Amino acid sequence: METKVLYTGKTHTTGGREGASKSSDDQLNIKLSSPGSSRPGTNPEQLFAAGWSACFIGALGIAAVKQNIKLPADTAVDTEVDLCIAEGEYSLQARLNVSLPGLDKQTAKKLADEAHQTCPYSKATKGNIKVQINIL
């Protein structure tokens, strides 16, 4: 089956964690800083968490439609991405804290489980990093 590219995000980054990143369409233009530094700017872990949260909410919406469930208007995902080090090697791990107000915990878990199977960020990390899904 042929893969159809729907969109390509393009950025130009200089200076690594202490630099800057700009998208090709000028919609993103940010300073970067290392986690915990006092320098202004965001870091790659925050950017990854923001992208994953947004994508996961989209996947929740698709799962809700398939299961004939109305997704709450105030659905939220608080994603935490940890930068870790063990034996001198860096890695990531993450927690997705899913809030689906008004839905019972079992229904919310069912939606989150399906979203985790279909979200492109979840698929990209599957088997690569430790991921925990929490229903709030």
Image: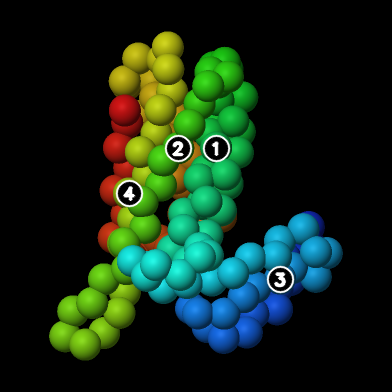
Q: Nearer the viewer, residue 61 or 76?
A: 76
Q: Amino acid at mark 4?
A: Arg
Q: Is residue 45 visible?
A: yes
Q: CA–CA distance between discs 3 and 1?
A: 25 Å
Q: Nearer the viewer, residue 84 or 123?
A: 84
**Which quarter shows the N terminus?**
bottom right
Residue beneath label 1, please?
57
Contact between labelled residues 3 and 2, with CB atoms less than 8 Å apart: no
Q: Quadrant of residue 105?
A: top left
Contact between labelled residues 1 and 2, with CB atoms less than 8 Å apart: yes
Q: Position of residue 100 (x, y in %)?
A: 43, 23
Q: CA–CA distance between discs 2 and 1?
A: 7 Å
Mark 1 falls on what kind of element?
helix
Residue beneath label 4, please?
95
Q: Is residue 44 visible?
A: no
Tag shown at residue 22: 3
